[in-house]
Amino acid sequence: MNQSARPNNFFSLLEGALPRIVVAPSFVAMVIFIYGFILWTLYISMTKSTFLPSYDFVGLAQYVKLWSIERWYVACRNLLVFGFLFIAICTGVGLMLAIFLDQKIRAEEYIRTIYLYPLALSFVVTGTAWKWILNPGLGIERLVREAGWTSFTFDWLVNSEMSIYAVVIAAVWQSSGFVMALFLAGLRGIDDSIIKAAQVDGASLPRIYGRIIIPTLRPVFFSSFIILTHIAIKSFDLVVVLTRGGPGYSSDLPATFMYAYAFSRGRLALGASSSMMMFFMVMAIIVPYLYSELRRKRHA
């Protein structure tokens, strides 16, 4: 065997294995700290854990107890209201803004930056800003009353019937620019020749958007729905900063419920069961999406 070929073979093997060696620590950390802790949380949700983890297995008792708590039902109802309004308004506003910017208007870059600016802020900053704006003693209500409309009332932040809608306002302001960017990228990817052919046939601009362009944006609609649903289910910091889940627990979401029971009330197993319910909600959306994508690629 040629002795000089061994070092070359060694370096060739090293070069081929180098990407795997570099990625391996991250892969191991991901397996342990994501999937490992998901399994640990699943087990804790089936134990008698209180302030500290306990490994006395009790089966599904914590899940039965969870669904007997009124506060959990309020959190789930708020999630439905918040998720529906958040997704619908963000999608509608984002689509309208994208169509507006797609008309090749002047100062498009500046307008696009203005709408994308909220995306650069964290939900903590957004919640703090909107807490000032919606505060009856500091924000919109006080401003309108000082302008002369003394009977004007806008107390959604401290009204238990309307507090969840205050969260919707802040969340929509934060995420609409992101959805606009997705739709604008989709619109810019459409072949102009299709639009010009429709215009030659005499179709009006609203008809072109309604019959041709918007239906072709189906993948963007689907991606926006998945991303916004994921944001809605895991929303925590915005609610904590803006309303702290109140008044009472009127604006609680599953994430704030989980935190309150796991870390404030010392009911770790119950908090773990609520977090697993959130995980199942996300999986109920992600798994069909991945299945449809894989099926589409297989038949492409």
Image (cartoon, rainbow, N blue to C red):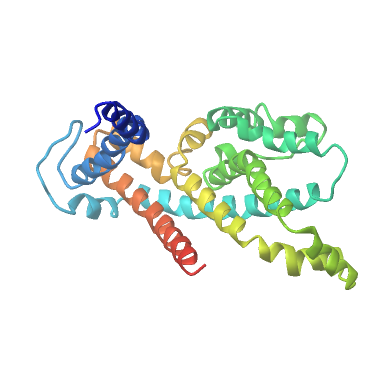
- Percent x, y of residue 197: 84, 68
Number of disc labels: 0
Q: Which of the 4 image quarters holds residue 159?
A: top right
Image vertical order of residue 13 relative to residue 218, above or below = above
User: Which of the two residues, 191 or 166, is positioned nearer the viewer here?
Assistant: 191
The residue lying at 55 percent from left, 30 percent from top is 122
Measured as percent of width and height from the top left, residue 286 is found at: 42, 55
Image coords of residue 291 (percent x, y): 42, 62
Q: Identify which residue is drawn at 43% across, 41% down.
A: 249
Which residue is at a point 15% across and 42% down the rendered structure image?
48
Residue 83 shown left or right of residue 180 in the figure: left
Depicted 83 relative to depicted 7: above or below: below
In the rendered view of the protein, which quadrant contains the N terminus? top left
Considering depth in this image, is 269 or 19 the residue closer to the camera?
19
Up the image or down, 249 lies above or below 92; here it is above
Classify residue 15 as left or right of residue 110.
Answer: left
- Dividing the picture into quarters, in which one does residue 202 lie? bottom right
**In the image, residue 126 above or below residue 74:** above
Residue at 23 percent across and 46 percent down: it is: 42
Task: Describe residue 87's horizontal placement relative to residue 194 as left or right.
Answer: left
